[in-house]
Amino acid sequence: MRAIRILLVAFLAITAASLPAPDTARAASRAAIDADARVTLDQFFKRIINGRELANKAEAILVFPSIVKAGIGIGGEYGEGVMHVRGQTSGYYNIIGASFGFQLGIQTRSVIIMFMTPSALAGFQSRAGFEVGVDGSVALITIGVAGQIDTNNILDPIIGFVFNNKGLMYNLTLEGTKITRIRH
């Protein structure tokens, strides 16, 4: 039992050290975040047939190209992204989360969050930090046959897409994650 605890502490220490720190001094450059976000949006538009139509209806789009989640029993996740309001960059954000329960391994994923109404966007922007599930909910959209979604029936003010899951863990939730603006 003691050996398992030592391994757990060692793994968590190594994992924590390998994840980017959430402070602005270590934040990725704006150019790197922008380039990764463009690639992520291109992948999204290729995978989701009417994704561009939905994006055009959105007030703003928040793109997190790579969120890394790691853990053994206790896990953490971190990623950086960019918000586009009507096609213009309006800020850079990080997403941080912790989780407890059965989990083992490392996973990366991309997340796109669309703000479909002006009031949803204003509510997000008015907070110093936005905790999903507390300050507002994000309805995760499932992709239908042949990568199509029904954009006419989406009525939620904030919607999200999680894709590019790679790794040993699989978790399609954003509940409990906190999104905070990065000051470059």
Image (tube, grey):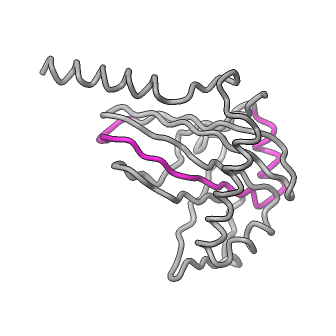
Where 147 falls versus 111 (above or below)? Answer: below
Q: Which residue occupies the foreground of this view, 89 or 26?
A: 26
Query: Which one is nearer the viewer's eye here, 14 or 142?
Result: 14
Does the segment drawn in magenta span residue 107?
yes
Tell me which residue sits at (53%, 47%) in the image.
Answer: 174
Q: Quadrant of the C terminus?
A: top right
The stretch of residues the image draws in magenta is 100-127
Front residue of 170/164: it is: 164
Judging depth in this view, the residue of 32 and 80 nearest the camera is 32
Percent from the top left, x then y, of residue 124?
A: 75, 43
Q: Is 14 left, or right, of 116 in this rendering? A: left
Q: Residue furthest left?
A: 1
* Residue at 64% from the left image edge and 57% from the top image edge: 40
In the image, taking residue 163 as reference, residue 87 lies left or right, namely right
As drawn, 46 above or below 163 = below
- Residue with the most extreme bottom position: 146
- The x, y position of residue 127, in whole percent, is 76, 35
Q: Left of 16 or right of it: where is 24?
A: right
Q: Residue at x 85, y 58 (%)?
A: 87
Q: Position of residue 3 (x, y in %)?
A: 15, 20
Above or below 106: residue 170? below
Q: Residue at x 57, y 25 (%)?
A: 21
Instruction: For the N terminus, give its image quadrant.
Output: top left
From this view, report whether residue 74 is shown above or below residue 36: above
User: Quarter-wise, where is residue 9 in the image?
Assistant: top left
